[in-house]
Amino acid sequence: MRTRLAIRTHALLERIFPERRVFLKSDADTRFVRLRPGTQLMAFAGGALLVAWAITATAIILMDSIGSGNFRDQAKRDQTTYLARLNDLSGQRDSRAAEALAAQERFNAALRQISVMQSELLASETRRHELETGIEVIQTALRETMREREDARTALAALTDDLQEGGGETAVASAVDGAPVDFLADALARTAQERDQVVADAQEALRHADDLVHEIALMKENNDQIFRQLEEAMTISVEPLDKMFSRAGLPTERIMNQVRRGYSGQGGPLMPLAFTSSGSEPTADMIRANRLLNQMDRLNMYRIAAEKVPFAMPVKRAFRFTSNYGFRRDPKTGGRRMHKGVDFAAPAGTDLFATADGVVTEAGWASGYGRLIKIRHSFGIETRYAHLSKIRVKVGQKVSRGDHIGDMGASGRVTGVHLHYEVRVDGEAINPMIYIKAAKDVF
């Protein structure tokens, strides 16, 4: 069976690759090389394999070249898009910072205007009280003058009656001695002069009273305008703060009560301002003034509370967000884990700042966090700053919002230089961007 198969195979090869002889001739002799069908088949197969390998290698090289070119172009396009997006975000951040600065300037200008208006209001109120007192004194003097004028008229009528009743005796007396008649004439002249003076004084007092009434009306109109401007300024100043605390999810009234308890000292020059009616019914101006003073007190408490809540940004230089708050995939385990803060990426050594007033409770190395700073704030709030390259505060140190507390680094479990920033309320982590976004139009 094998011999027959071999014979058939050899015959097939003979038809395809007939036996060939290659003659090699030299000067001395002539030789030949016989190429059998099997040898030719092996040579053909080797050549075919070589050609196939060359074609395949060439195709692979061309495909790699084309693919790498596409990848480079795509990478360049992605890099261009990323840079454009980064520039756009930087521009938006700068515009937001400029808007926040402008809002802060408007807020400070409103506070200055409120202070000036309050001084004007107090001065006008004092002037009004003085004018009312002056009018009351003038009216008292006028009533006294009118009473004296009536007494003088009564005395003059009595003298006239006496003259008419005793005319004969008076004529005889004047014939004997003219002194009583001259005395009576002088008394009548003086009485008439005093009466005319009293009438003139009364008319002058009435004109002065009319002028005072007109001046009081102007002052009331001016006070009403000042009140309206103060109310508008307070509305513009207080409403954004109300919205800021509401957007941050903070219990506004509880925070106000806590601030009020912490700043409740009174007496001396720190006694709170208030208008009183001294036992009588309060006027509309007093009610409006006390309402404005209450709003100003609320604005001041808002200012105090805002310094103690982390509304500020921990990074003031150019940065980009590299990780948000929430669940993310762990590159080592492949599972999902909770990321309890936000990450800000910037060059190593970038200054980091406290986002609110507080006390440093921890400043050192912590597993996973690297170099870590913890700051305890009011209202049960705590902030954490992790992966620092340098710590610039100590435990127990009091810090204010905007104080330089450390430098950005890559300590602990990280893939690069960045700041891991956390906010915790009563020990529970919350999204720090809630506070930052709530204050973007205020600070």
Image (spheres, rainbow, N blue to C red):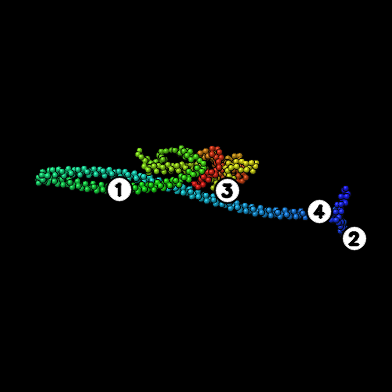
Horizontal side of 187 relative to 114 (left or right) equals: left
What separation in Å lies between label 1 and label 3 (alpha carbons)? Answer: 71 Å
Which residue: 26% across, 43% down?
143
Residue beneath disc 1: 210
Q: Nearer the viewer, mark 4 or mark 2?
A: 4
In the foreground, 424 or 336: 336
**Could you tell me if the residues under marks 4 and 2 are in contact, i.e. CB atoms within 8 Å?**
no
Q: Which mark is residue 45?
A: 4
Q: Which mark is residue 13?
A: none
Crowding near the residue tagged with mark 2, few <14, some 14–19, many ≥20 C-alpha atoms within 10 Å: few
Estimate the x, y position of residue 282 in percent, counting from the top left: 37, 40
What separation in Å lies between label 1 and label 4 (alpha carbons)? Answer: 130 Å
What separation in Å lies between label 2 and label 3 (alpha carbons)? Answer: 88 Å
Q: Which mark is residue 320?
A: 3
Q: Quadrant of residue 331?
A: top right
Q: Label 1 is placed on what type of residue?
A: Asp
Q: Label 4 is placed on what type of residue?
A: Ala
Is disc 2 placed on a helix, strand or loop? loop
Q: Label 3 is placed on what type of residue?
A: Arg
Q: Nearer the viewer, mark 2 or mark 1?
A: 1
What separation in Å lies between label 3 and label 4 (alpha carbons)? Answer: 62 Å
Crowding near the residue tagged with mark 3, few <14, some 14–19, many ≥20 C-alpha atoms within 10 Å: some
The tag earlier along the polypeptide, 1 or 3, is: 1
The tag earlier along the polypeptide, 2 or 1, is: 2
What separation in Å lies between label 4 and label 2 (alpha carbons)? Answer: 33 Å
Is disc 3 placed on a helix, strand or loop? strand
Which residue: 83% across, 53% down?
42
Crowding near the residue tagged with mark 1, few <14, some 14–19, many ≥20 C-alpha atoms within 10 Å: few
Q: Which mark is residue 29?
A: 2
